[in-house]
Structure formats: C-alpha cells, structure tokens
Image (tube, rainbow, N blue to C red):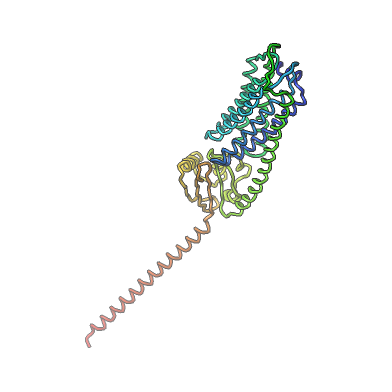
Amino acid sequence: MFRVFNCLVSEHDLRLVAIAGLVCFLASFTAINLFGRARGLSGRARVNWIVAAGAATGCGIWATHFIAMLSYDPGISIAYNLTLTALSLVLAVLITSLGLGAALSIKRLWGGAIGGGIVGAGVACMHYLGMGAVELPGRVTWSIDLVIVSIVLGMLLGAVALAIAMKRNDIRSSLVAALFLTLAIVSHHFTAMGAVEIIPDPTRTITALSLSPTSLALAVASAAISILSMSLVSAFADRRVGDRSLLLATALNNMTQGVVMFDAHERFVICNDRYLEMYNLSREVVKPGCTLLDIIQHRIATGSLTRAAEEYRDELITGMAEGKTLSAIVETPNGASISVVNKPIPGGNYWVGTHDDITERLTTERKNAALAEQDQRRATVETAIQSFRESVQIGLQTVSMARPR
C-alpha cells in the first residue's frame, strides 16, 4: 500500500484530488437520496428513480475518475480516446443502475449488499475502461495484486453503502451510506492508480480522435454541473416531499384509529400517534429501521399482546403474502377492546394495520343487549301472569256456572 500512497502524494495534484473527492461525495449523496425515493415506489415510477440514481452514481464515478486523472502527472503528455471515454460513462450508468435495481428487486435482507457489490463492479469497469482510453507515448502495465485489491475494495464498500441505504432512509443514514459509496469509488481509483506503471515507448502515438486534457476538463465540468443540477432537483423534491409528509402526518395524527404500515421486508414505515398511545409504545423502539418482530416483542413487553411473538409474526406475514385481510379483537391490560384489521396494499410492497378502540361501542352494545334481554324477560313474566289470571278467571266462571241454582 506504500506504492499507492506514494503514487497519490508524488504523482497527483492534491488540490484536484480534493475536488474529485468533493464531487464524488456530492454525486453519492444525490444517488442515495434518489435511491431512497425509488424504495417507496413501484412499477414505472420506481424504474424512473432507479435510472436517475444510476445516472447520478455513474456520472459521479466518471467525473471522479477523470478529475483525478487530470491531477495525475506521469511526466509525459497524455490524451484520452474519445470513444472509450464516452463508453466508460455509459457503462458506469448502466451497471450502477443495474446494481441499484437489484438491491430493490431481491426480496432478502442481503439484497442491498448484492446490489452494492454490483455497483462496486461498475466502478471497476468504468475505471479500467477509462484507463484504456488513456493515450500516451508508452505502455501501461499493471500490478495484478493491487488491481485485485482495488476491485475488492470497491465491491465491499459499495455493498456496505447500499446495505445501510436499504436498512434506513433518514438523513443520517443517507450521509453514512454516501460516505461509504464515496470511499468505494475513491479507494478503488487510487488503489488502481497505484497499480499502474508506465514504460516509455516513443513508437506509440496519440490518435487524432482523442481529447486533450483541456477538452476533458470541459467535459468533466459539464458532468459535474449535471450532478449539481440533479442535487438541486433532489433537494427541491425533498422539500416537496417534506411538505406532503407533514400534511400526511397531520392527517394521520388526527385520526381516532391507530394506523401502522410495514413494507414487504417487514420493516416499519410509518404510524400515527394514536397507535403509540393505544398500546403505550415507545418512540425509541417504534421508529424507522425497526422490524415487525421488534414491535411485536415491544407490545408483549408492555403487556398489550399475549401472543407468541414468532407465531404472530408468521401469521401476519403469511396472510399478507397471500393477499388476505386479517381481523381480530384484542383485549388490553386496561380493559380496552381493540379491533385490529391488517390488510395488504395492492402491489404487494406494503401492508397496513388499523387499530380501532371499540370498547365504548361494545359496552353500549352489551348494555343494549342486557336491556333488551331484561325487557324480554319482563314481557315473558307479564305474559305468564296475564295467562295465569285469564286461566283463574275462566276457572272461576266455570265453577260459578256449575253451582245448582
């Protein structure tokens, strides 16, 4: 790794390296935010956000690579093959989009890690194709051990980045995921550059269809501007989504029913205040990132549920997977009766549970039933008495008529 460090310090302009890192983090943060939008959608809308996230990631990888290449000074003049340079950008966008799509399509907890590994592989493809675009009067040879290390670093850190992004969708997690994605791109690039050795060869010439460093700088600047534009669009979308989320939260918190939503991976999505109050649940437990089993176990701990945790979880998951609506009435320790209805949302990505306190309704129904039963008993007694009186009166009349006159 000393070779990598020496390459970075002695053969690169550290000012441009810093700019490359900044652009990379900006692109990574944008990509993670766009990826977060895709998680909450389905169908064509999800595909559109995945493509947008892939474009942001691909542009970020491409811009980082070539800004860092502009900072690289091998001691001889270099240029960049136009076709391979453009192809490296297209490849970066396609493979990273594929990785992001895989992370959302694989219905397993490790889907994010697999998708992140594919993104890391996209970083490697872009880098080595981009290095293939370099034209100079010499031959490039590679240290295979560092090449392998660079690929492993990119895939491993990429897997960590998307695993974090899949687990939670808050601002802190987005920043951490973006940091790991940045490390995946940057560590791959500079480790791979440490593997480079240039052997001068005057017989090799620069082709006519190539970019000078100045032209490349303009192309990279355009890509960086595109990334900034996507960042602004993402920020604007965040604001709009934030406003809508506030309206949604206000509406939910003014409902008399408790409402809770989970996704297909059993992760908690949202609930209203009434749900927390109904079962005396803690916001420290019921928060984004927790699972259905976490909440079930918390309810058991608070005494609002007496079912076996795993059994109840399996019943819910099986019912939601089969598209069934599950209904039950739960009695809480304080004597409340809760009508619980769990219903899958069309599309299969989410399901919602509604919890309605029907204690007062049941009490009223029981009182009405008791009064009705009491009235029925009274009517029966009165009917019996009336029948008895009529029987006695008929008997008396019969006796009277039977007496001799």
Q: Position of residue 187 (x, y in %)?
A: 68, 24
Residue occupying image coordinates x 53% and y 50%: 354
Q: With 301 as the anchor, is 240 left or right in this view?
A: right
* Name of the residue lying farthest toward the front: 208
Asked where in the image residue 53 lies, by quadrant, the reply is top right
* Name of the residue lying farthest toward the left: 404
Q: How many marks?
A: 0
Q: With 366 as the anchor, is 99 left or right in this view?
A: right
Question: Which sits in the foreground, 403 or 94?
Answer: 94
Residue occupying image coordinates x 74% and y 25%: 214
Q: Position of residue 229 (x, y in %)?
A: 69, 38
Question: Which sits in the foreground, 286 or 306?
Answer: 286
Asked where in the image residue 385 lies, by quadrant, the reply is bottom left
Residue occupying image coordinates x 56% and y 38%: 47
Q: Position of residue 37 (x, y in %)?
A: 61, 40
Placement of the N terminus among the 4 image quadrants:
top right
Q: Can I make out residue 297 in this image?
A: no
Question: Which sits in the foreground, 241 or 142?
Answer: 142
Q: Is residue 194 above or below residue 323?
A: above
Q: Is residue 200 above or below residue 107?
A: above
Q: Can I make out residue 241 in this image?
A: yes
Q: With 370 as the anchor, is 247 left or right in this view?
A: right
Q: Position of residue 293 (x, y in %)?
A: 54, 39
Asked where in the image residue 155 lies, by quadrant, the reply is top right
Residue occupying image coordinates x 63% and y 18%: 147
Placement of the C terminus among the 4 image quadrants:
bottom left
Q: Is residue 130 above or below residue 373?
A: above
